Image: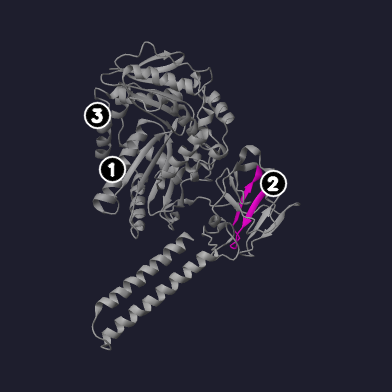
């Protein structure tokens, strides 16, 4: 079996003949990296709108929005392929405006239920708040995306010139049509960088240790990923018994490079040992200690996966991805030959490349400067020089903290004199809340919170006016407890904690008072009876004491429930 190249209605197509249910996919060269932070989520929303008309079909279908491609795929009878692809092509040109708000809610619900992990933080630190770093951010753009925005996005990216089809089955359906508008192929976005230098590190928010490296996309890189996983698993799980998960991943970026990531989890109190063991493995790679047996094992597994009867059919989505991103496509025999030619020296070369670009996430509170990693920036190096027109606002929570609103920037200087600055011409998004709160996020992912309740007198309208409309996001109202206020314990400027506000009416106050009195009285009775029995001052009658304790516990629970609901 071989992969054949053909064309359907001007759309490049790859086909592998196989038995069983037909499988097919239509890929478009657009993904999350093509968006802006202010329109984050528009591609995912469009994917949902395209699939909605299909309803509950008798075959399995789905869609996915990746970093650089959007993929619609199915498995089912051959005639279902024609119906599915025709529906996709029709929907991208005829979006249902009445469905937009409903799908926004569904997409937001999906995001809210998504399980996040330590690796989700890595893109933000490497790329910032644009292109390949956007995947680390919430889909804030859903609040502002309009029907017009969606139609423009579809017309630009969902075209025959920006698509590739793959099909696995007995025969390509004779009546298959891909009725798409004309368009051009869009190149993968060039990656930005938020790292002044590498190798770099930052302290994560969990006990895990992780690595992210950018290397040339080639078979040696994939073998390196397998070798690194074997080394980490052996060192951290089998030998030291410190980690449950010690794994790697390899993802093509579509621009000739790939991202190699590695993760090792840890229990509280064990994270330091895991970090040390993780760095020991990296140090061995750095000095070229590559075990030939590890290389051979990874190569053998990779080549065995290419020798199955269904191997070419399984490769179709990745081959379509390579075609769509203008990357070299190797046939199965070429790929096997290249894999078998990889030895320890080739893996050593790939490892050196990976470590040169490495971004390490240490466990919370840990550093890695001692291991040769430079701390990634967490703010601005210095506040901008004073200029005419600057307006300074002292924090009502801490006079040593101030917010400066200039003609070109907003800058916050905290009590230890560290500055956080976002320039208006470098603002990726401005989140605007109805209560007046603002969040400015720079392209480097540095952010400044502007809270009128803390920085009294700050003119948020002037800030809004200096940020282009396409970068402003009108956010929904915040929960009152999420708005910082002076006088609230722990409130410190832009770092105000999310404390719930309790504003009780008369009825609630009376109810709380009654339950509090009853809980105290019954608790006192229970304690007095128990002590009296213990010292012999009264007859040993445990039932009254138990009843009093139960009553005290009941009223205490009612008090807590009423306080929570208030």
| Mark 2 or 3, closer to the camera | 2
Specify the quadrant of the image occupied by residue 253.
top left
Q: Earlier in the sequence, mark 1 or mark 2?
A: 1
* Image height of 461 relative to 343, above or below: below
Give the residue drawn at x 58%, y 62%: 416
Q: Which residue is mark 1?
A: 230
Along the horizontal axis of the image, is 553 left or right of 541?
right
Q: Which mark is residue 304?
A: 3
Give the structural element (helix, strand or loop) at label 3.
helix
Residue stretch in magenta: 409-424
Q: Earlier in the sequence, mark 2 or mark 3?
A: 3
| Mark 1 or 2, closer to the camera | 2
In the image, residue 23 lies at what x, y percent?
33, 22
Badge 2 crowding class, 10 Å Cα cut-off, few under 14, some 14 to 19, many 20 or more, is: some
So how many labels did they put on this image? 3
Q: Which mark is residue 408?
A: 2
Could you give the CA–CA distance between mark 2 and mark 3, rounded to whole angstroms?
Answer: 59 Å
Report the colour scheme: one colour
- Asked whether disc 1 touches disc 2, contact meaning CB atoms under 8 Å apart, the reply is no
Return the residue nearer the eye: 86 or 66: 86
Main secondary structure type of the part rendered in magenta: strand
Along the horizontal axis of the image, is 206 left or right of 405?
left
């Amino acid at each position: 079996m071989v992969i054949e190249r053909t064309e359907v209605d001007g759309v490049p197509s790859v086909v592998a003949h196989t038995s069983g249910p037909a499988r097919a996919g239509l890929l478009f060269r657009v993904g999350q990296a093509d968006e802006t932070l202010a329109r984050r989520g528009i591609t995912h929303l469009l994917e949902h709108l395209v699939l909605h008309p299909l309803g509950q079909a008798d075959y399995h279908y789905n869609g996915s929005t990746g970093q650089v491609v959007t993929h619609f795929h199915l498995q089912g009878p051959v005639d279902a392929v024609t119906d599915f692809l025709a529906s996709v092509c029709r929907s991208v040109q005829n979006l249902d405006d009445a469905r937009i708000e409903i799908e926004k809610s569904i997409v937001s619900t999906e995001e809210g239920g998504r399980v996040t992990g330590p690796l989700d933080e890595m893109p933000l630190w490497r790329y910032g708040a644009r292109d390949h770093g956007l995947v680390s951010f919430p889909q804030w753009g859903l609040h502002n995306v309009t029907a017009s925005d969606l139609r423009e996005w579809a017309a630009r990216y969902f075209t025959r010139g920006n698509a590739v089809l793959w099909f696995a089955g007995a025969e390509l359906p004779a009546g298959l049509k891909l009725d798409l508008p004309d368009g051009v192929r869009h190149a993968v976005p060039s990656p930005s960088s938020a790292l002044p230098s590498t190798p770099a590190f930052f302290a994560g928010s969990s006990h895990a240790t992780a690595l992210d490296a950018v290397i040339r996309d080639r078979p040696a890189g994939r073998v390196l990923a397998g070798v690194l996983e074997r080394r980490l698993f052996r060192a951290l799980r089998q030998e030291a018994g410190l980690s449950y998960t010690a794994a790697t991943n390899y993802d093509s970026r579509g621009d000739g490079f790939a991202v190699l990531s590695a993760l090792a989890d840890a229990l509280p109190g064990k994270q330091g040992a895991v970090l040390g063991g993780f760095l020991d493995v990296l140090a061995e790679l750095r000095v070229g200690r590559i075990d030939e047996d590890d290389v051979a094992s990874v190569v053998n597994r990779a080549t065995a996966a290419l020798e199955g009867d269904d191997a070419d059919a399984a490769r179709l989505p990745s081959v379509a991805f390579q075609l769509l991103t203008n990357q070299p496509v190797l046939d199965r025999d070429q790929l096997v030959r290249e894999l078998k030619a990889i030895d320890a020296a080739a893996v050593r070369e790939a490892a050196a490349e990976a470590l040169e670009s490495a971004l390490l996430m240490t466990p919370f509170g840990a550093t890695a400067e001692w291991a040769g990693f430079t701390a990634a920036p967490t703010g601005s190096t210095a506040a901008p020089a004073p200029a005419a027109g600057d307006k300074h606002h002292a924090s009502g929570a801490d006079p040593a903290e101030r917010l400066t609103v200039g003609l070109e920037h907003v800058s916050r200087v905290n009590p230890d004199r560290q500055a956080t600055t976002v320039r208006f011409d470098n603002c990726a998004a401005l989140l605007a809340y109805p209560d007046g709160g603002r969040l400015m996020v720079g392209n480097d992912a540095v952010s400044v919170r502007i809270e009128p309740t803390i920085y009294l007198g700050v003119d948020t309208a002037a800030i809004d006016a200096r940020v282009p409309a396409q970068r402003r996001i009108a956010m929904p109202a915040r929960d009152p407890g999420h708005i910082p206020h002076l006088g609230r314990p722990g409130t410190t400027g832009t770092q105000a904690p999310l404390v719930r506000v309790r504003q009780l009416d008369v009825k609630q106050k009376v109810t709380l008072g009654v339950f509090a009195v009853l809980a105290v009285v019954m608790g006192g009775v229970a304690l007095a009876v128990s002590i009296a029995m213990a010292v012999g001052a009264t007859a040993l009658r445990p039932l009254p004491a138990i009843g009093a304790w139960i009553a005290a516990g009941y009223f205490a629970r009612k008090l807590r429930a009423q306080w929570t609901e208030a």
